[in-house]
Image: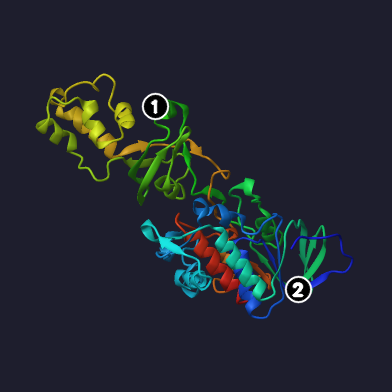
Amino acid sequence: MEGGGRRREPLNFDIVVIGAGAAGLMCALAAGRRGRRVLVLDHADEAGKKILISGGGRCNFTNTGCVPERFLSANPHFCKSALSRYTPRDFLGLVEKHGIAWHEKTLGQLFCGGSARQIVAMLLAECAAVGVEIRLRQHIREVTRAERFRVETEAGDILAHAVVLASGGLSIPKMGASGLSHDIARRFGLALTELRPALVPLTFAPDLLARTQALSGVSLDVTAACGKRAFREAMLFTHRGISGPAILQISSYWREGEAVVLDLLPDTDSAFLHARKRARPKAALRTVLGEALPQRMADVFALPEIAACPVGDLPDKTLAALAAGLKAWRVVPAGSEGYAKAEVTLGGVDTAALSSRTMEARAVPGLYVIGEAVDVTGWLGGYNFQWAWASGWAAGNAA
């Protein structure tokens, strides 16, 4: 599977897939099943590296709720065709065909019962069965097109009728992420939408961090909202800001300068402190808050000058303001942890340049773009894998 020395004569394939990740491998096996001669190239030393680290090593490989409304794109309708033609049930059928145990967690998330390596092994086995050739540690110098595409690598040149850009986005550079697909797309005249880190922890400015840093490691269920979008999941305080599923989800909708509004007590009525005042007037505010929040949070959110006061001695106005702050804590993040911690890249090759049915570039016949390289970004919880499978399947059945 690894490359050797430089060759003089170009090799010939029907399709060259650039990127041996989720989308690329799915595309390759789909094309291979149609009898196409397929070569997959990747600069990494192992196929499916992002698959291997996903879901804590168990791979959250899809989600039962993969409706188009849970994907972000400048054209929200673009993903509909591919998602409708290769569904979570289709991928689950492949998983079950290979005898891989799986289970469903909350919110429709499907995980391997064992290791994410089983998913990579499954994809590689499917590719091998249809004669797909995979070469790793391949460094691509250039992709050009005359009568056919020419892919120039350090190990030699390859000619192909079609090229599929499947090398992902900019997220997690330590795993080898690069802008290769975007760079090649630009060279062929394809426009890109704005690129941003998505599904990423948010950071606080020093003044807010001074207040919350003592909460690092504290987790609780919240509703995180930005604009018209809200997510009810867990939030985690970090030494730099906030993370956890609720924050990763809302980060895809957040923009610099905007506020994120956090309901820290989503199951508690806003009048809960007044109720405690009537029921237990002698209980200290710190104690009462500690019954609703993790104690470290209660200590931070109970103002020092009144923390030890009996709730019965505090004015209703003070209690109402405190409860309102807990039910709608408004924070303006300073930024995000960037691509280093982002699970995906928001934005990509503009869908206006692509066929939604085949993923082919309208102005460059034979050039396809799939997966994270496209301006389609899913929610947290298996959605981006399903887009990889679906877009890869669409291109693999068309190239």
Residue 167: x %, y % from top left: 64, 58
Q: Is residue 355 visible?
A: no
Front one among 121 and 106 = 121
Q: Is residue 280 visible?
A: yes
Q: Which mark is residue 13?
A: 2
Front one among 399 and 49 = 49
Instruction: Residue 124: name its quadrant.
Output: bottom right
Residue at image coords 22%, 21%:
308
Residue 234: x %, y % from top left: 37, 45
Q: Disc 1 or 2, which lies upstream in sequence?
A: 2
Give the amino acid type for the residue marked by disc 2 in the picture: Phe
Report the label total. 2
Residue at image coords 53%, 69%:
390
Q: Residue furthest right?
A: 8
Front one among 64 and 358 = 64
Query: Is 176 situated above or below 14?
Result: above
261 horizontally vs 391: left or right: left
Give the amino acid type for the residue marked by disc 1 in the picture: Arg
Residue 396: x %, y % from top left: 62, 73
The answer to whether the residue labelled 1 contacts the one labelled 2, judged by CB atoms less than 8 Å apart, is no
Location of mark 1 (residue): 211
Q: Secondary structure at mark 1?
A: helix
Front one among 113 and 20 = 113
364 horizontally vs 322: left or right: right
